[in-house]
């Protein structure tokens, strides 16, 4: 008989504990503010963690066009255009540095191999666009203070940089070969 009462008590106590947890969360959902009320996004930036990986920061003046970042990228989403520097200068002049954000997975594997420390993961999280081509950002066309900006990419400048006339994944001569 005693065991029976103990089992009943255990069942009632454990169900009550479970219901209390459920009720507490139920009440919290009513007291909790919506995301836009808490952060006032987009009027105010959303607070980020210190090691947040957002859109890249890139310094065109330091880049030597070595392609190491593009080779390290596991999804091949960095496209570098470069020309031989005019003598007496040596090396390359980088004329295009496009990153396709429809493919980028923000893994940061492009950052470590860079010998010139000119590419980093930035803290920008918001570059909206209306077409898939708009997701390709050409950092060589952005003003340096925007591309290398600490916190944010200026949306107007980013929009201007997206005027890519051809899809970047079109390989030169591919059409001639297949014709
Ligand atoms: S973060 Fe990763 S996926 Fe994106 S460009 Fe760099 S290596 Fe490629
Ligand atoms: S690894 Fe660095 S220096 Fe080399 S192409 Fe990439 S960004 Fe430029």
Image (tube, helix red, strand yellow):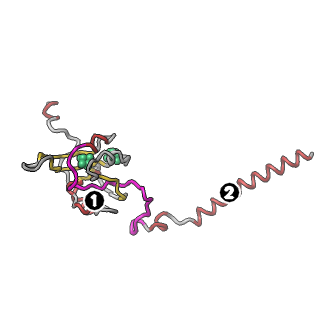
User: Is any atom of residue 68 visible in this view?
Assistant: yes
Q: Which residues are magenta?
A: 41-67
In the rendered image of this protein, does residue 63 appear above or below residue 35? above
What x and y, as percent, mark residue 60?
21, 55
The question of residue 53 being in magenta is answered with yes
Q: Residue at x 26, y 43 (%)?
A: 68
In the image, taking residue 60 as reference, residue 43 lies left or right, namely right
Please count the marks in the image: 2
Q: Residue at x 66, y 60 (%)?
A: 24
Q: Dot 2 corresponds to which residue?
A: 21
The label nearer to you, 1 versus 2, is: 1
In the image, taking residue 33 as reference, residue 138 lies left or right, namely left
The N terminus lies in which quarter of the figure?
A: top right
The question of residue 97 being in magenta is answered with no
In the image, taking residue 125 as reference, residue 131 lies left or right, namely left
| Residue that sits furthest to the left in the current view | 87
Q: Dot 1 corresponds to which residue?
A: 148
Q: Residues within 10 Å of mark 1 (few under 14, many from 20)?
A: many
Q: Which comes sooner in the sequence, label 1 or label 2?
A: 2
Q: Residue at x 23, y 45 (%)?
A: 79
């Amino acid at each position: 008989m005693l065991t029976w009462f103990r089992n009943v008590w255990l069942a009632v106590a454990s169900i009550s504990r479970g219901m209390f947890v459920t009720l507490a969360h139920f009440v919290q959902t009513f007291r909790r503010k919506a995301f836009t009320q808490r952060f006032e996004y987009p009027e105010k930036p959303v607070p980020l963690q210190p090691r947040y990986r957002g859109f890249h920061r890139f310094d065109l003046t330091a880049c030597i066009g070595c392609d190491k970042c593009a080779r390290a990228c596991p999804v091949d989403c960095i496209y570098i255009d470069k020309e031989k520097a005019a003598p007496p200068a040596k090396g390359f002049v980088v004329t295009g540095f496009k990153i396709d954000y429809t493919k980028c997975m923000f893994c940061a594997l492009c950052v470590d191999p860079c010998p010139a420390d000119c590419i980093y993961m930035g803290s920008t999280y918001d570059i909206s666009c209306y077409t898939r081509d708009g997701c390709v950002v050409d950092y060589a066309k952005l003003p340096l203070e925007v591309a290398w900006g600490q916190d944010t990419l200026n949306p107007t400048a980013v929009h201007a940089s997206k005027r890519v006339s051809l899809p970047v994944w079109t390989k030169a001569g591919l059409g001639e070969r297949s014709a």
